[in-house]
Image: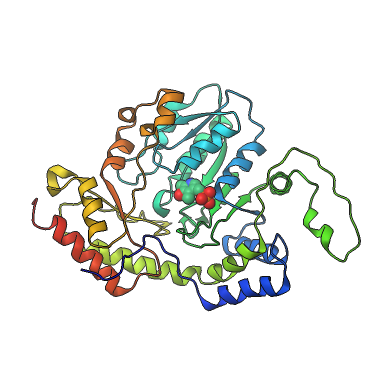
Amino acid sequence: MRNEFLVFGQPLIGEEEKEEVLDCLNKAWLGTGPKVAKFELDFAAYKGASYVAALNSCTAALHLSLLALDLQRGDEVITTPMTFCATVNAIIHVGATPVLADVQPGSMNIDPGEIRKKITKRTRAILPVHFAGRACDMDAIMAIAEEHHLAVIEDCAHAIETEYRGRKAGTIGDFGCFSFYSTKNVVTGEGGLVITRKPEDADRIKVLGLHGMSKDAWKRFSDAGFKHYDVVEAGFKYNMMDLQAAIGIHQLSRVENLWKRRETVWQRYQHAFADLPLGLPAPVEPGTRHAYHLYTVLIDESRTGISRDSFLNAMTGEKIGVGVHYRSIPEHAFYKKAFGWRGEDYPHAYRVGRETVSLPLSAKITDADVQDVITAVRTLVGRSGQ
Ligand SMILES: *Cc1c(COP(=O)(O)O)cnc(C)c1O
C-alpha cells in the first residue's frame, strides 16, 4: 500500500511559474495586464488562431460565446449529455434551451446522427465537447451546421492539444472554449480562453468579460495618459489576472512535454489492462490527435465482479485518487426537474456515466505512481471475469 494519497489530476508546476508569479508580486501588478496579453499571444500562436480573449474560466468562455450569438429565449442549443454541468448551465444562463443528443458508445463524443434527429426550427447552435481530449467528428458536425445555418461552439476544456484532420480543436467552429482549471492540461488555477473565428466576436467578448467597459479598459492605469472608459453593454467580471497568466505562460511553453508524458502513461495503462474484463478507451481515430486529458475505464459489474462505486471506494482505499467524468447530465436533479430529462433516454451516455472511472493521468505522476495504479486495478478486477 502507498504511503501518500495520490491526488487526482494534480498539475506539474515548474520553477519558472513560481518566479513569474513572484515577478507579479514584486511589481505589484496582479490584475489583467501585460502577462495576460502575452499569454493570449502565446496561446494564439500555439493554436494558429488570430482572435483570442483570455478569461477567468471556460465556463465564462462558454457563457460569453453563447451571448455573442444574441440568442432569443426559446432558441435551442444542441449539446452532449456526457459533459461537465458548466456546458449545459451556460446555455441556460443566456436564456436558451439546452437539447441533448446522445454520444457514440466508442468515442463517447456527441453522435452527429443524434444531432440531426434533434434539430428543430428553433435550433441555433451546436455545442460539441471533445470528451477526454478525443476529437469529435467535426466534418459531420460542421456539415450539419452549414446545412441548417447553425453556429458551432467547441467545448475544448479537455482539448488544448487535440487535432482533427490537420486542424486544431477550437479553430474549426465559430468559437473554441478552453479551461485552465487546476486539473486541466495547462493550468492557471482558475482560467479560460476563447478563440473566435471572427475578430468582432473576440472584441465583443473582451468587452463583455470586463463589465461591458469599452475596449482595453485595463490600459487606463498606464502612463499613456488618462483615459475615460465608457460602458457599452451590461457585462460580467470574467477577466483573467496577470497572477493567473504568470502560471499559464510557462505551463503553455511546456504543453508538448506534458502531453508526451501523459501519452506515455495512457499507453502504459492500455497495455497493462488489455487482458482485463474492463472497457478500455477506443484507439485514437486516424487523422486525429488525442489530448490525453482523461484515461477512463468502464466497470461493468457483470464482467468485473465489482460495482463501479465499490471500485471507486476500493481505489481510494488504496490511496489512489480517482474521478468520474461524468454521471450523465440528465441524471442530475436540477435538469430532471427543469426539463423532465431521463437518463434512459440517452442510453449510451447513461451507461458510460454509470460505469466510468477516470484513473490518474497528470504529467506529475511518477512511474512508481503509475505502477501503483496498475497493481491496484489488476488486484481489484484481475481475478474475476474472463
Ligand atoms: C472543466 C470543464 C469546463 C469548465 O471549465 P472551468 O474553467 O472550470 O470553468 C467546461 N466543460 C468541460 C467539459 C470541462 O471539463
Left-right relation of 320 to 119: left
Q: Residue at x 39, y 41 (%)?
A: 82
Q: How is the image coloured?
A: rainbow
Side (left or right) of 99 relative to 286:
right
Q: Position of residue 35 (x, y in %)?
A: 68, 66
Q: Position of residue 178 (x, y in %)?
A: 54, 53
Q: Is residue 300 visible?
A: yes
- In percent of width and height, residue 36 lies at 67, 62
Q: Could you tell me residue 342's position as x and y percent?
A: 35, 27
Q: Say which quarter of the image contains residue 354.
A: top left
Residue at the (57%, 28%) spot, across then down: 96
Q: Quadrant of residue 272?
A: bottom left
The quadrant in which the N terminus is found is bottom left
Camera-side residue of 261 and 170: 261
Nearer to me, 373 or 137: 373
Does residue 156 appear in the picture of this structure? Answer: no
Q: Give the quarter of the image for residue 369.
A: bottom left
Q: Where 276 sits versus 35, above or below?
A: above
| Residue furthest to the right | 225
Give left or right: position of 146 versus 298.
right
> How many numbered marks appear?
0
